[in-house]
Amino acid sequence: MSGLYRSLFLYIIFASGLYSMAQSVDPEKRAAFYHYHNKAKYYQNVDVDSANIFTDSCLIIAKSMESEYFFGKALQLKTRAEFYSSDIDSAIIYGNKSLEILKNYPDSIEYFLAEYNQGNFYLSKDDHIQALVQFKRAAQIIDENFETYVLVDEEMVTINQAYCHASIGIVLDDLEDYEGALTNYKKALKLTAKVDNWESEMLRANVLNNMGVSYVNIGDYQMAESYAVASMEQKKVLNQESSIGYSYQLMAQSAYGRRKYDLAIKYLEQSDKKFSILMNQDGIDQNKFIRAKCYLAIGKYEKALELLQQVEEVFLSRFSKSDQAEFYEVLAEVYQKMGELEFANDYLRITLKLRKEVDVKNDKKIVKEFVDFIETEEIQLNDKIQNLKNKQEKEKLQLQIESDREKEVWIYTLFLVSIICLVLIIMVISSAYRKNRKTTKELSESIEENKILFKEVHHRVKNNFQIISSLLNLQYGIEQDERSKKVLTDAQGRIQSMSLVHEMLYSRSDVKRIDFKSYVQELVPSILKSLTEQSGKITYEVKSGDESFDLELAVPLGLILNEAITNSVKYAFNDQDKGKIEILLRKLEPLTYLLIIRDDGSGIPDQYLKGERDTLGIELIHILSDQIGGTLEIKNEGGTEIRVTFRV
């Protein structure tokens, strides 16, 4: 079902929608037809029962009209209704009837739609090769009839082309050709950028999400999360809150790929809330499966088994065989981890059988379809070559007959042709040079634009942090309770450490990495200034090489520093006139580092170190160390020393 729930079922009505073959239809019947047709199309997204009533009325009127074109158009409407009702078999029956009629109108947009939607039927049956061939055929129909379609509605033709590339991308992703999928998705985005309407923007949002899916399959989880966020923002602008569930689901898959299983589960909770708006049970069931994989990864096998048992029947009845194979593979692994080897072996055999069926099915189809395609192309090419040869032979014979009488004319003609060819070659080379220079300029501008966009994002994030800090400061001014004031001050410190990361990213040329030493030298004075009024009482020293870290690592390191220094300032030097804080970063191995934060104060009381008493600062340092996959050690040796060993 992974391909089906991302598929793009296309049904479009043009402004005029009428062709020469339909002009003789009774105007009153034509008006009534489009009235019911448009009503049915609207209610298909709102009220299924009302949509079916208007669809049936549209079919009745179409039968009484003189042109079969309208009956084929009405059948396409019925096809769409059955498809969205998940009655795929009925949708295929109506779709085939519609296509049989509309083949008589090959230059109509309805014929293109019928061919295009056949691809969705193959996709719903997990027949990816047939679906790929069908979507490419639909794209070819647009190319062949482009001039005719443009006369009706140029923007809608552009959207149709975008739909074709988006659908081809979906199929290629399911066939594990992820680079090919991304190439077609980018073509779809480029086409949608030419059209400014709701449908184009909604298609753009779906394509962005599908690109994220491809990046998950590639293993580039950072890019996947970026596209999920971009898709989510697009859907928010379009007020499509329910479909944001797919964006959260994609973010959960990215977190799962990065082994952030707790974070993945939190994203799935948000996804479930969005899917519940329109009761998208398929999406919720898919989330249960991802959640089960998370529980399997963290060793909660009973919870994983419980979730898998809840969705097993759904996967068997509604999801594709590829998804079923993955489901039973996970189920087999759960039973294997629980020691139930007999069950594990049984489900593993089912997995292998399903995957073999999918592979065999697609292999047979790909040989047949592409051999037919190549043979057709070869025949057409041979015909063109033969026609060209015949034409050349005829011209050669004619020149030979006339050569004796018109030799001088022939020489002058040859000379003139040579000059023309030379001029054409110069023009082609010049055009290619200008095009290459233009392309180079566009690439440079695109790179610079991306840098500006990255900086603008981090600038806005930093400003948002500043707004939050200001709000906390206002609350601090009106708060009477000292404990509440302390909580607000601590929160401001943590926000400042995160804000500083984004400030450094947008104010420097490198928009991806943070220089650790510069970051600490800006962060520590800010913390000291906010916590102590006695300038010079506490000094600090930073020892580090030219190390830099990405955003995902720099933020937790900054928060660890914030908590450690805040604790030192507040508690370590109460009985001392002066104090010193040292921050050291050592490189132990090529990818392993040791961060040391120590002071010469009174040290942390034993009851905190032994866990007999709780302190939020130490607890946060533990959590942040786990987040970056590090090990934490806290000890008292002439003061407090915090040591965090981590890998990048």
Image (cartoon, grey):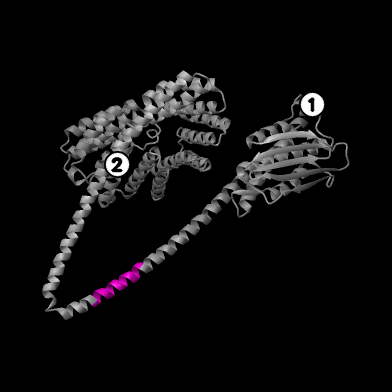
* Left or right: where 87 falls relative to 181: left
Q: Residue at x 21, y 35 (%)?
A: 71
- In the displayed structure, 415 sits above or below 483; it is below
- Residue 417 on the magenta span: yes
Q: Residue at x 54, y 22 (%)?
A: 301
Kindly identify the amino acid type of the residue bearing the numbered disc 1. Answer: Gln
The residue wearing badge 1 is: 607
Determine the main secondary structure of the stretch shown in magenta: helix
For mark 2, does the 10 Å Cα neighbourhood hold few (<14), some (14 to 19), or many (20 or more) residues?
some
* Left or right: where 383 falls relative to 637: left
Q: Give coordinates of residue 406: x percent, y percent.
A: 14, 78
> Quarter holding the C terminus?
top right
- Quadrant of residue 280 within the rendered picture: top left
* Left or right: where 225 falls relative to 389: right
- Quadrant of residue 479 within the rendered picture: top right
- Residue 535 on the magenta span: no
Label 1 sits on a secondary structure element that is helix
**Mark seen at residue 133:** 2
> Quarter holding the N terminus?
top left
- In the displayed structure, 420 sits above or below 73; it is below
First of labels 1, 2 by sequence position: 2
Q: Which residue reaches farthest bottom?
A: 408
* Left or right: where 199 falls relative to 520: left
Q: Give coordinates of residue 32: x percent, y percent.
A: 24, 35
- Quadrant of residue 372 within the rendered picture: top left
Kindly identify the amino acid type of the residue bearing the numbered disc 2. Answer: Val
Q: Residue at x 21, y 76 (%)?
A: 413
Q: CA distance from mark 1 to mark 2?
A: 70 Å
Decide if residue 119 is in sight here. Answer: no
Question: What is the magenta range?
Answer: 415-428
